[in-house]
Amino acid sequence: MIHPRQREDETMSRSETRNGKKDGTLLSGEQKVRTKSVVSVEPGRVIRKRRELAGWKAAELARRAGINSRTLSAIELGRIASPSLKHLESLAHALGLSMASLFSPRDDASNRTFLLGNPKGVQKIEFRKDGFSIVCYTPLVHDFFVGKVILNGENQIEERMLSTAGMIFVQPIIGKLSVVFDAREYLIREGSYVFFDGSFPHTFENPSSREVSFFLVTVPSFVARLPRRLALVK
C-alpha cells in the first residue's frame, strides 16, 4: 500500500521534471533558452550605411577621414576584418559617430541618426542657370528635406525646380521673399514664415536686387525629383 505522503512526493517530482527542474538544477534545455546570444557586428557595414545615409561617395568620406579610398573600400567590404584603431577613430569622427556605435548590434542607422552639422551643411546644390543654390542641412533622403536656399536678386524659383507633392515650410533668413501660392502673392519678411501644400501651384520670387536667403523644409523631400544634371558641391 502506498502512503499518501509518498504519492504526493512522486507527483511533485514528475511535475518538476516536466517544468524543467529537479532538485533545484536547471535542465540543459532551459540553460540554452537563458543563454544570451553573442552578436558579431562588422564596423565596415555600419560605416557604409552611415556614409550612404549622409549621401557621400566613398571618396568623399575617405577625404574627410584622411585615409586612402582603397583602405576605406576594404573596410566597408570586410576585407580588412580588424581595422586599426586610428582608422576607426578617423571614420567615426568624420561621420559624427562614437567609436562604440561602430560595433553596436543595432546597426539600422535610419532609426538612430545623429548628425552634428555646421553652416556649410552636408553639401550644396547649385542651380547656376536659374540663379539660386541650396545648402543641405540634412542628408539627401526621401522622407524629408531641411536646408537653406540662397536666391539671387530679381530671380524666381518655379514650382518644377523644388517639386514635392507634400508640405512645404519657408522662412526668410535675410531679406524679403515673395511667395506666389495658387495665383495669390504674399510678401514674407524676416521672422515670418509660410506653410503650405506643395501640390498647389507656387513660386518663390526675390523682388530685391540683393541676394535673399530662406529656410526650406519639404516633406517628402523634393530631391528625388531633381534633374541629374545638377551640380552637387560637397
Image (tube, grey):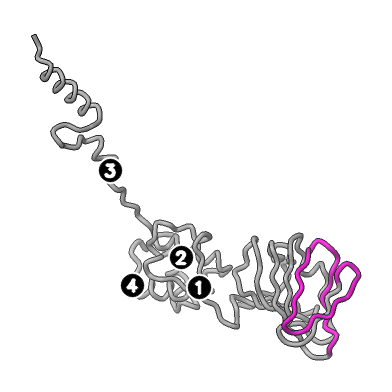
In this view, 198 is above or below 96: above
Amino acid marked by disc 4: Leu
Q: Is residue 88 left or right of residue 167?
A: left
Image quadrant occupied by the C terminus: bottom right
Tag 2: amino acid: Ile
Residue 25 location, quadrant: top left
Residue 156 seen from this side: no
Residue at left offset 35%, top offset 67%: 83
What residue lies at 83% left-to-right and 75% top-to-bottom? 179
The tag earlier along the polypeptide, 1 or 4, is 1
Mark 3: which amino acid? Arg
Q: Quadrant of the N terminus?
A: top left
The numbered dot on residue 115 is: none
Viewer-closest of 19 and 116: 19
Task: First in sequence, mark 1 or 2: give its number.
Answer: 2
- How packed mark 1 is, by other alpha carbons closer than 10 Å (few <14, some 14-19, many 20 or more), is many
Disc 1 + disc 2, Cβ < 8 Å = yes
Q: Which residues are magenta?
A: 181-208
Residue 61's label in the rendered image is 1
Residue lying furthest right: 183
What residue sits right under mark 3 in the picture? Answer: 34
Residue that numbered label 4 is attached to: 85
Q: Horizontal and vertical percent for residue 13?
A: 17, 25
Q: Earlier in the sequence, mark 4 or mark 3?
A: 3
- Mark 1 → mark 4, Cα distance in angstroms: 17 Å
Q: Position of residue 155 (x, y in %)?
A: 84, 82
Q: Earlier in the sequence, mark 4 or mark 2?
A: 2
Q: Residues within 10 Å of mark 2 (few under 14, many from 20)?
A: many
Q: Secondary structure at mark 1?
A: helix
